[in-house]
Image: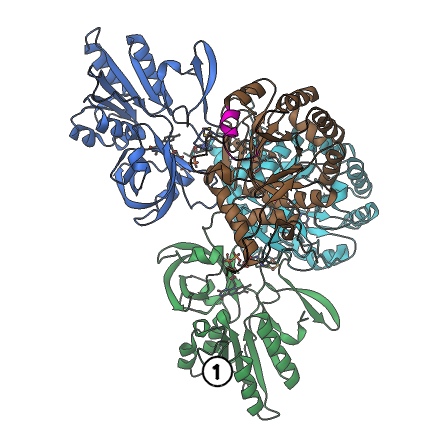
Chain colours: A brown, B blue, C cyan, D green
């Protein structure tokens, strides 16, 4: 099927001024800090790596159990365990800087000032290429998620981060809202360079024999193939509502789901839970997108992004 | 750590419901150390997201064996695996048991293994490779849960069995023969404990080690997400010089010095 | 395991004054009007049947394709095809009246007055036991869904229906809101006798080869096991927020999922997509709940409903 | 309509990629009429929600056979079915081809069957039961898509084959030999068409029937949800005395009078 004569398709995309060699990133919380999977998924092949959510102070996260498998997905309540921004820079940036991979740092806070401060500390740190602003974690009691479900709060967090960094910033939106377009527009207006969606979906699993929640945190976030058709709809709506690039997340486990996001209007995608099942999935997705472009005689991502034909 | 597409070579009943699954492995089999594990990527069930972790029971010469018990969706689907089927193998994962260098000036202490159920799996690889023979105490609910004892005996290890229903070996928990043996030991006898099995068993071994001033290495079993240290699902509270910290069972373990574990 | 001496558990529940012999209903749109499945799932064994959504005038529904299977679920955009309220009464009520099964009529409209008028026409129709008020269908362009994502509109619909019927009414809530408790409380205050949730979740599937939406309606609603952990969380939150009974819907395909809803606080459950895979699933679920109650020495549904133990 | 747990009796290659799957059935096999279908509830893949519909190709004496082509997740998973495996069978479903009463005063018109691919399946049961022998026109992309022709011939039916690549029978679509035959018919010859296959084929038959003033019965293939008329997923536009209405392919069909279909 491959037209051998045609030049190889160019998979590069630019997100908020940051050039990625391809549109496939690994999602926050599912790929650690890169070092954990580097043996089997060469980091330099990734579009970017988004590291686990970082807060100002170290955070111990939730009690265990923290993760449970459900049909077609996972429900997790890790609780954003992390070594804090200084710990992160000291422990992981030396390794990441030596890899030819753009590093996107996912940041979160319990108060707006915390987001602002984490952003400030990361600004100018060599090797940090962009900030993903997590306003949508379903697993911390205070803060986090509430920012993602209130328009004013979402905009305020983004504005505060914007004021404290020159790095490209991409807020990560909560899926459990009625009007995703409004949230995408609000963060665009507040200075976001791109918008990423979706985070895992608030969910709960009960052990019927013990009549207790399976997760120590009672509820958690659903991720994986189960949420993919929901994410496609939200990405489609967000992409129509804003000018800035949209990053599609949710249930990508092969080239097909990534292509759905791109065709729906995403400029890039992230792979989360699927890394656990196949640590080399990102490579497969990148290769699959290239194959698809060759088969469909597409030379650049412009031919693919937003190419949905409605009618 | 390597990711391989592996082929089933043998799949046989190991006693009780347990199965021994032998896989062809180009690189993981040669690299694995006792107490390390692998994770299997299964094609079925189609809606399973996670790989399944298993201790390596035996390895070498391009072959790697695991001992498993069908308990849930994934392990039950594994029952259908046949010679020639392929599956994805990730490993070696985690940190295993500390092995004394075989050329050490000092001979290693007497190794005392304590196992429950499939806990014999990593201990068998340890027994095969340990520079000194020792004892295995193995317990289970019934005789159907007592596995591989003749394999240990064939290596020249002394095997003590206990079952809760008394259907094989002594009647009671594995601590029954263990305590009898400990009581008969000389007061200042030194040995090293290596244990794998249910948490209660590991805790019991840890208590005996602490009481006797011995070291104990225990292999924990936690539900895992990634198996490589990336997701922080499998964490266990550890003592770190008085401070409590999380250890990742998959990456910092699964084998820990029992003295570091915060038993809850 | 069964204690043979104990009397059989009593599965009866009362929803807004309506007594059901067990808490298991079949969900609107997935069991037609009962006649289609009656050969293989005896209607008299069901807690209740909820019929396909009925509007004032006959409705042709959407163009085809209307349904697509995704991993762990379905995305449908039937578009509420129905013969209209008078057509429904004439064509289907004679059959249903002869069956010893409570009939819940799912109603919808494009304007509040339509809901009110459909409710009025059904009030007093022999054999109609309750109305489920669909304010959450993701598949009609105007009306429907917007009522389910705006607090004031949701309350207004319920109040209008309340004013036009003596039947028990149960609004069916949309899942894609940030605060389900507020919606449950709003409809309770407006006169609802119970609250049902969730409807299918807005979703989209793209055929990457043609770069077209698979469904003629572009988007549809995701149902099935994929949405179950989301539904459990929402049901748990709604049940804590209101005094009226909650009906749990979403991904029930066996006793375990039904038990999760009941333990989370639902007084009854509905089975939707799973009927397609196993037309006798409702019978299996009823039997499974009874078995569970026997094993756990529960004599009535009071022992089960809301029995979640959150430390 | 019945729901049965059925057992696989035989599973064999039928030519090309197609398979014949024979199931033990207590009641459905005896009740099914030509053109009706069954739906299979498969255990795998685990994340499949829907049953899969298949025309009944042969039935009787507690056995029921379907002819299928592996095209997607469900049908590919079916390839693993072995004699003795069980699956859920729902049927008979829908309305099949109208069958003339065998004791009618008037002999039935000459039956002309037109099939593409697995479209021969329902037509074979029809041929077996029809009170009069007739002709089968069957087409496909290649010779590998031409199935069961000897079975029809064995029943005494006249078989005409066409393939698009010319690898078997006439070169071209099935309409090539059909049109040749129609051209040779007497002007006022009466016959009944029965067709099953891709929409283009059905439409072509409908056009020829309409042109010749004959009746044609066509069996539609639509993606289904419930298969029993409950979900309204499978609808097809029909002419109802000038008014356009939806017909449910699963319940009101799958066989329709071609003159009623709104071809789009
Ligand atoms: C390091 C390590 C080594 C192991 N070695 C072996 C071995 O050598 N042999 C062997 O047989 N097994 C071994 N196991 C256990 C093995 O991994 C499990 O038995 C297997 O993963 C079960 O998969 P399943 O799909 O069959 O069960 P599942 O269906 O996934 O689950 C089985 C049971 O666990 C429960 N469960 C699932 N997820 C969670 C969760 N997050 N929290 C709490 N409960 C949960 C389920 O409800 C169910 O009761 C090892 C585990 C670890 C971590
Ligand atoms: C009345 C009837 C009789 C039939 N008889 C036979 C028979 O005798 N023999 C036989 O081999 N087959 C028969 N079929 C077809 C058979 O049911 C399908 O081939 C089978 O269901 C495919 O299942 P799958 O899981 O293999 O494919 P799937 O993976 O489900 O799908 C196969 C293809 O269809 C597409 N698709 C799936 N759902 C939709 C949708 N809603 N809209 C558009 N495209 C969709 C997929 O994208 C894919 O390309 C019959 C169908 C009907 C309705
Ligand atoms: C175990 C786990 C941990 C996660 N941690 C974070 C996190 O720290 N910050 C964040 O923004 N998202 C986090 N997520 C959400 C993912 O980045 C992603 O948005 C979500 O899983 C949906 O993508 P998927 O379906 O591909 O998994 C986490 C997800 C999982 C499964
Ligand atoms: C094909 C189909 C048609 C449906 N039609 C209706 C409807 O007419 N009215 C309604 O309130 N819900 C309708 N629903 C939603 C279901 O009643 C139910 O809320 C949803 O499917 C979630 O339950 P499930 O996961 O068990 O399927 C429909 C669902 C499906 C799959
Ligand atoms: S399982 Fe992911 S960190 Fe241990
Ligand atoms: S498939 Fe459900 S009505 Fe035809």
Up/down of C166 relative to C43, above or below: above
Residue located farthest toward the top when viewing the structure as drawn: B187
Q: Is residue A238 left or right of residue D41?
A: right
Judge the density around disc 1: few (<14), some (14-19), many (≥20) Cα neighbours within 10 Å: some
Residue at 75%, 57% in the rendered image: C59
User: Toward the viewer: B8 or C299?
Assistant: B8
Left or right relative to B238: residue C221: right
Q: Residue C221 colored magenta? A: no
Q: Please provide percent x and percent y for residue C200.
A: 65, 45
Q: Is residue A92 visible?
A: yes
**Residue assigned mark 1:** D170
Q: Quadrant of residue A244?
A: top right
Give how far across and how far down residue A36 sits, in percent. 46, 31
The location of residue A98, given as percent across then percent down, is 50, 30
User: Which image quadrant: the C terminus of chain A?
Assistant: bottom right
Q: Residue at x 56, y 23 (%)?
A: C310
- Which residues fall within the magenta stretch? A92-102
Q: In the image, residue B124 lies at what x, y percent?
A: 25, 29
Q: Is residue B161 left or right of residue A253?
A: left
Whether residue C47 is visible to the viewer of this picture, yes or no, is: no
Q: How many marks?
A: 1
Residue D245 is drawn in which quadrant? bottom right
Q: Is residue C234 above or below residue C81?
A: above
User: What chain does badge 1 belong to?
Assistant: D
Ligand 2 neighbours mark 1 (CB distance < 8 Å): no
Q: Which residue is outermost to the bottom?
A: D186
Asked whether residue A101 is drawn in magenta, I would say yes
* Residue B15 falls left or right of residue A248: left
Q: Nearer the viewer, residue A266 or A81?
A: A266
């Amino acid at each position: 099927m491959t037209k051998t004569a045609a030049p190889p398709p160019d998979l590069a995309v630019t997100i908020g001024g940051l050039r990625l060699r391809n549109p496939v990133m690994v999602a926050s919380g599912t790929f650690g800090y890169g070092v954990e999977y580097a043996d089997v998924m060469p980091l330099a092949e990734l579009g970017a790596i988004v590291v686990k959510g970082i807060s100002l102070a170290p955070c111990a996260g939730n009690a265990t159990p923290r993760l449970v498998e459900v049909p077609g997905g996972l429900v997790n309540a890790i609780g954003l365990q992390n070594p804090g921004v200084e710990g992160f820079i000291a422990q992981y940036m030396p390794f990441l800087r030596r890899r030819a991979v753009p590093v996107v740092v996912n940041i979160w806070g319990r108060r707006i000032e915390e987001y602002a401060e984490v952003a400030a500390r990361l600004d100018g740190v060599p090797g940090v290429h962009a900030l993903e602003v997590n306003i949508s974690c379903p697993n911390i009691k205070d803060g986090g998620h509430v920012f993602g479900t209130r328009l004013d709060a979402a905009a305020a967090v983004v504005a505060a981060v914007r004021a404290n960094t020159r790095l490209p910033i991409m807020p990560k939106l909560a899926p459990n809202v009625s009007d995703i377009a409004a949230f995408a527009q609000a963060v665009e207006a507040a200075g976001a360079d791109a918008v990423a969606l979706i985070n895992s979906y608030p969910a709960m699993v009960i052990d019927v024999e013990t009549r207790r929640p399976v997760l120590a945190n009672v509820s958690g976030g659903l991720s994986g193939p189960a949420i993919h058709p929901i994410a496609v709809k939200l990405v489609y709506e967000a992409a129509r509502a804003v000018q800035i690039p949209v990053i599609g997340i949710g249930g990508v486990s092969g080239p097909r789901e990534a292509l759905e996001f791109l065709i729906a209007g995403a400029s890039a995608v992230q792979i989360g839970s699927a890394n656990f099942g196949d640590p080399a999935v990102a490579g497969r997705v990148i290769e699959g997108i290239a194959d698809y472009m060759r088969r469909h005689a597409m030379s650049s991502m412009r031919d693919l992004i937003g190419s949905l034909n409605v009618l | 750590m390597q990711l391989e597409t592996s082929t089933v070579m043998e799949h046989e009943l190991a006693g009780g419901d347990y199965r021994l699954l032998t896989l062809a492995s180009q690189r993981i089999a040669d690299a694995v150390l006792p107490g390390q594990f692998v994770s299997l990527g299964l094609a079925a069930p189609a809606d399973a997201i996670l790989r399944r972790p298993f201790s390596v029971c035996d390895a070498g010469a391009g072959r790697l064996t695991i001992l498993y018990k069908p308990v849930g969706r994934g392990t039950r689907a594994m029952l259908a695996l046949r010679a020639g089927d392929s599956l994805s193998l990730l490993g070696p994962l985690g940190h295993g048991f500390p092995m004394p260098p075989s050329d050490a000036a000092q001979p290693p202490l007497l190794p005392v293994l304590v196992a429950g159920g499939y806990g014999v799996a990593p201990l068998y690889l340890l027994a095969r490779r340990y520079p000194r023979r020792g004892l295995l105490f193995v317990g289970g609910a019934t005789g159907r849960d007592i596995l591989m004892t003749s394999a240990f005996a064939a290596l020249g290890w002394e095997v003590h069995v206990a079952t809760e229903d008394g259907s094989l070996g002594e009647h009671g928990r594995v601590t029954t023969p263990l305590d009898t043996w400990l009581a008969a030991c000389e007061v200042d006898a030194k040995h090293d404990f290596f244990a794998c099995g249910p948490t209660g068993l590991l805790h019991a071994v840890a208590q005996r080690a602490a009481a006797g001033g011995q070291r104990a290495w225990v292999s924990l079993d936690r539900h895992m997400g990634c198996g490589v240290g990336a997701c922080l699902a499998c964490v266990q509270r550890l003592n770190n010089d008085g401070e409590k910290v999380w250890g990742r069972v998959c990456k910092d373990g699964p084998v820990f010095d029992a003295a570091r574990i915060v038993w809850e």
